[in-house]
Amino acid sequence: MSGREPGPVLLSMRGVGRVHGHDEAAVHALRDVDLDVRLGELVAVMGASGSGKSTLLTIAGGLDSPTAGTVTVAGDDLGSLSTKARARLRRRSIGYVFQDFNLVPALTAIENVALPRELDGVAARRARAEALEALAEVGIAELARRFPDELSGGQRQRVAIARALVGPRRLVLADEPTGALDSVSGEEVMRILRARVDAGAGGLLVTHEARFAAWADRTVFLRDGVVVDSTGAPSRAEHLLAGA
């Protein structure tokens, strides 16, 4: 947990709701959610299975659209953007880290990290240079030429984090990034995410483990799509989970 004051708001969600289906079959995945994530701030989201955690993350990143409310990233209202403009904003401003890494098996670590920059039109040489810098930041520059199946789980997740933050991206969305890792690798991944946020990013982390939520500045609790509490105290997190 950082002792610094957070910076400007990077992600803002206001009155966000998401309904799947219609009439009697309607499922309210999210209800009237308000949430801000600032530069220099890591926010954890916790809740039981089906509480809306992953839906919150996909809407925050523009991969899904809310049925109510607004989502703003780096000053841009996602709902006002065309499909093409929203995809461009995702490539340039938002990075995703998933539990299963989502690396391309046929590409080396440096090629995986450079890929989103090349897709955004950045010249290959510059994209590779940025990718190598990102890999160095997560401590595995020496593994740049290895393929995913030549890396450990923790190393693959570091590659995924480097890919999420390569270039000008400042918002990182992490969906159970430690779920497929042992406890030591999980702690190391959280240490890297924490350091990157402290260096000038904003993070939204979905996790079901209080020990990983303890790395965050704040923890938001979801129950049936509703924010039921928000706190910065890990002990409070454990108490609420025990009573869920």
Image (spheres, helix red, strand yellow):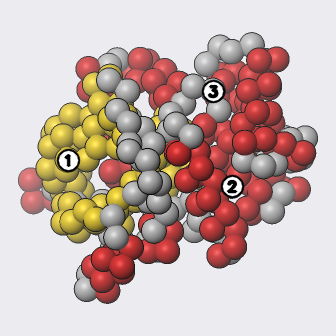
Is residue 27 at all visible to an observer of this figure? no
Quadrant showing the C terminus: bottom left
Position of 4 with respect to 37 (left or right) is: right
Q: Around disc 2, counting alpha carbons within 10 Å, would you say few (fewer than 14), some (14 to 19), or many (20 or more)?
A: many
Q: Kindly identify which residue carries mark 1.
A: 34
**Can you tell which mark lies on residue 156?**
none
Q: Earlier in the sequence, mark 1 or mark 2?
A: 1
SS state under label 2: helix
As helix, strand or loop, the secondary structure at mark 3 comes to: loop
Q: Name which quarter of the figure residue 106 lies in.
A: top right
Left or right, 13 with reference to 177: left
- The amino acid pointed to by label 3 is Gly
Residue 43 appears in the rendering: yes
Q: Which mark is residue 167?
A: 3
Is the residue 75 above or below the residue 210 in the image? Answer: above
| Foreground pick, 115 / 143 | 143
Q: Which is more N-terminal, label 2 or label 3?
A: 2
Q: Amino acid at mark 2?
A: Gln
The reply to whether discs 3 and 2 touch (Cβ–Cβ < 8 Å) is no
Q: Secondary structure at mark 1?
A: strand
Upstream in the sequence, badge 1 or badge 3? 1
| Spatial CA span between label 1 and label 2 | 30 Å
Residue 157, which numbered label?
A: 2
* Identity of the residue drawn at 74% across and 13% down: 123
Give residue 172's position: percent from left, percent from top. 50, 43
The residue located at (30%, 77%) in the rendering is 236
Quote the CA–CA distance across marks 1 and 3: 29 Å
Look at 28% across and 37% down and name the residue there.
12
